[in-house]
Image (cartoon, rainbow, N blue to C red):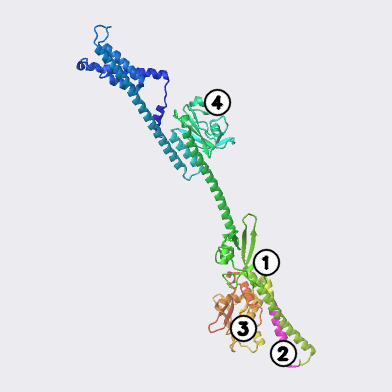
């Protein structure tokens, strides 16, 4: 409330003692009549004894207005005596007034008493009306200030800021000079100080105060009723053990902080003088405590909720980070099958985020070699026709609401490896059995000596030689595979003239395949490369053999050429065979892969081209395949010339090569 309104209300509460009030009212009546007589003296020449009571009657009304009936009565009696002495004509000092004067004095007395009661009644009515107006204004002001406090405390803010705001609002509302707010329950030994504002007391540097019943704060926490303390002496008398803390001579008020009828702390307010509040203001003070206590509990609850939410968010972020770091897809479904948690890997593997677990791809009944179980099975990848995904479901029933955790793993390579391994074992057994059988048959015929004279004998020996070479090539390719898997494909480099080694390979191929035409061309003055001669021969042999298997068509020759391209020596093997699709080039160098066009018409294990790329890259070179215009294929490999080899990837400076 405003300071003027507070002062007015304070004045209405000043009640002097009865004796002092009675004497003061008599004095008011005497002074008022005396003033009227003094005013009449200078007017006497004009009045000339007439209208004796013209100024006395208003004086009586004024006396009754300001002093009540006692003052009015005193003024009336004083006016009668003054008129008898100064204005009534008598034959002698002790003679009785005339009949007319007596009648005038009687009428004056009646008028005086009537005026006294009328004026005093009007004053009483006015005072009652004024008091009611002031009380209404006080109630309206308090309601407005309580609403203002409620609005100020209902804004989102921290507990410390809310405590400071509550003190400042309470100080302004009650006209205090400062205060402190402490929180705690009845069972707490000490109350924690949240905030102070202009507080006068010995709490500097203190974080808490005692919650003893013998302290002002402890008393209101237990009684849940506000206390108005009149001055320092009353505080000392009421709480002697805290006398040293009471430094101000002015009043103080202690208000409990209330939340749902329970005290959660206390608000201690200092004043610079009389507070102007008493027991009749208890409800108003309790309302302030309830406003502050409720707002404080809300702020504490919000802070706790925010802390819990932040911790939950941190845990969720950690879980999300862990899930995103996992290469396998993770889905979590609730009891209704709705997906409530997923990671990036799941979306990457599935191409989308399923809404429910029922939206996952169905179990693949044609999964090769994987019958699966109820909670572990294979599905086809929705993104790749040849892709496979493994789905593993883990039911979670630790809580009342069950859920499922689903792991999704890309097993395409594993499935393909199983398929390729099975195919390889079948092909390899055939590839090994065929030359061995041919050798055994030829040896058996030679041993028997039947029909093996002359040219027939030489044919059998040639067959043995060819099949032995074929068997050797397979064994050498398997040896490279074994070394590569162990990471031991180190190559001892030496200067090598590629065209000489490749020329020898071409010559042997011509002898072994006399019905095929192989053209060979090499540029003049080709520089040497640093390589392993055995591996260069193995690459060339595999590429030429591959061309003889798949590239002979319509009697067109196979071309083998060697040339330089910058710091590289390139070897090309060109044919006009069935060729392959442009997008199939890289797959041709995949282990166990064979061109679908010729897989049934030509023998092979699907490891030759894979070995070519391994050996070329191990020596710091490259291997490739390209479809040719007009049909057929180009296979080639390149090796760096001496002097440039150390700048190539995968090359060791000592002259030894390592597997890429």
Q: What's the magenta bit mostly, secondary-structure-wise? A: helix
Q: Earlier in the sequence, mark 4 or mark 2?
A: 4
Write down the residue under mark 2.
Answer: 459
Judging by the rendered image, the residue that carries numbered circle 3 is 550
Few, some or many C-alpha atoms within 10 Å of disc 2 (few <14, some 14-19, many ≥20)? few
In the rendered image, the quadrant that contains the N terminus is: top left
Q: Residue 240: which numbered mark, if any?
A: 4
Q: Nearer the viewer, mark 4 or mark 1?
A: 1
Mark 1 neighbour density, 10 Å: few (under 14) some (14–19) many (20 or more): few
- Give the foreground label among 2 and 1: 1
Give percent across and percent down for residue 645: 59, 72
* SS at mark 3 in the image: helix
Compare residues 292 and 638 and report the one nearer the observer.
Answer: 292
Q: Mark 1 near mark 3, Cβ–Cβ under 8 Å?
A: no
Q: Which residue is mark 1?
A: 373
- Choose top left, top right, bottom left or bottom right for residue 396: bottom right
Q: Quick check: is 448 in the magenta stretch?
A: no
Q: Which dot, 1 or 3, sits closer to the camera?
A: 1
Looking at the rendered image, the quarter that the C terminus falls into is bottom right
The image position of residue 158, as x and y in percent, is 50, 44
Toward which corner of the image does residue 415 lie, by quadrant?
A: bottom right
Of the image marks 1 and 3, the number of the one nearer the N terminus:
1
Q: Front-most of 38 and 529?
A: 38
């Amino acid at each position: 409330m405003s300071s003027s309104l507070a002062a007015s209300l304070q004045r209405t509460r000043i009640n002097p003692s009865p004796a002092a009030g009675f004497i003061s009212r008599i004095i008011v009546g005497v002074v008022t009549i005396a003033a009227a007589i003094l005013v009449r003296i200078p007017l006497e020449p004009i009045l000339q004894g007439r209208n004796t009571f013209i100024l006395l009657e208003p004086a009586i009304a004024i006396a009754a207005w300001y002093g009540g009936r006692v003052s009015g009565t005193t003024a009336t009696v004083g006016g009668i005596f003054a008129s008898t002495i100064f204005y009534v004509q008598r034959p002698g000092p002790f003679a009785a007034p005339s009949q007319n004067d007596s009648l005038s004095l009687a009428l004056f007395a009646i008028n005086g008493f009537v005026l006294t009661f009328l004026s005093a009644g009007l004053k009483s009515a006015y005072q009652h009306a004024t008091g009611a107006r002031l009380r209404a204004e006080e109630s309206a002001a308090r309601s407005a200030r309580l609403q203002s406090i409620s609005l100020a405390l209902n804004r989102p803010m921290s507990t410390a800021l809310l405590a400071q705001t509550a003190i400042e609002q309470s100080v302004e509302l009650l006209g205090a000079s400062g205060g402190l707010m402490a929180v705690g329950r009845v069972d707490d030994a000490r109350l924690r100080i949240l905030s102070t504002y202009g507080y006068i007391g010995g709490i500097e540097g203190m974080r808490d105060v005692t919650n003893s019943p013998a302290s002002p704060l402890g008393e209101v926490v237990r009684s849940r009723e506000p206390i108005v303390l009149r001055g320092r002496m009353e505080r000392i008398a009421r709480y002697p053990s805290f006398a040293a803390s009471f430094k101000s001579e002015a009043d103080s008020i202690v208000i409990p902080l209330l939340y749902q009828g329970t005290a959660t702390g206390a608000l201690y307010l200092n004043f610079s003088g009389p507070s102007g509040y008493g027991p009749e203001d208890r409800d108003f003070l309790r309302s302030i405590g309830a406003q502050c206590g409720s707002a404080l509990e809300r702020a504490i609850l919000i802070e706790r909720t925010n802390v819990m939410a932040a911790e939950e968010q941190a845990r969720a972020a950690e879980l999300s980070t862990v899930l995103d770091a996992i290469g396998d897809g993770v889905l979590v479904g609730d009891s209704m099958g709705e997906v409530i948690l997923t990671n990036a890997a799941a979306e990457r593997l599935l191409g989308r985020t399923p809404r429910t677990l029922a939206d996952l791809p169905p179990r693949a009944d044609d999964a090769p070699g994987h019958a699966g179980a109820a909670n572990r099975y294979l599905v086809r990848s929705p993104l790749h026709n040849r892709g496979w995904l493994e789905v593993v479901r883990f039911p979670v029933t630790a809580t009342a609401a069950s859920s499922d955790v689903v792991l999704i793993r890309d097993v395409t390579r594993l499935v393909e490896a199983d398929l390729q391994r099975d195919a390889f074992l079948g092909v390899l057994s055939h590839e090994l059995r065929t030359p061995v059988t041919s050798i055994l048959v030829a040896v058996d015929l030679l041993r028997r000596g039947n029909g093996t004279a002359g040219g027939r004998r030489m044919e059998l020996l040639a067959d043995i030689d060819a099949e032995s070479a074929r068997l050797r090539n397979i064994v050498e390719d398997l040896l490279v595979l074994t070394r590569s898997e162990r990471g031991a494909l180190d190559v001892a480099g030496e200067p090598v003239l590629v065209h000489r080694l490749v020329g020898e390979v071409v010559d042997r191929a011509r002898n072994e395949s006399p019905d095929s035409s192989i053209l060979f061309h090499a540029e003049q003055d080709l520089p040497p490369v640093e390589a392993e001669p055995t591996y260069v021969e193995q690459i060339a042999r595999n590429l030429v053999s591959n061309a003889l298997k798949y590239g002979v068509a319509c009697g067109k020759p196979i071309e083998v050429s060697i040339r330089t391209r910058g710091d590289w020596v390139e070897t090309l093997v060109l044919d006009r065979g069935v060729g392959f699709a442009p997008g199939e080039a890289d797959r041709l160098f995949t282990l166990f892969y064979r061109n679908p066009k010729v897989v049934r018409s030509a023998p092979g294990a699907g490891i030759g081209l894979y070995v070519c790329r391994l050996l070329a890259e191990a020596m710091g070179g490259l291997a490739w395949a390209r479809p040719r215009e007009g049909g057929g294929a180009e296979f080639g490999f390149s090796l760096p010339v001496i002097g440039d080899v150390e700048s190539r990837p995968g090359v060791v400076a000592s002259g030894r090569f390592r597997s890429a």
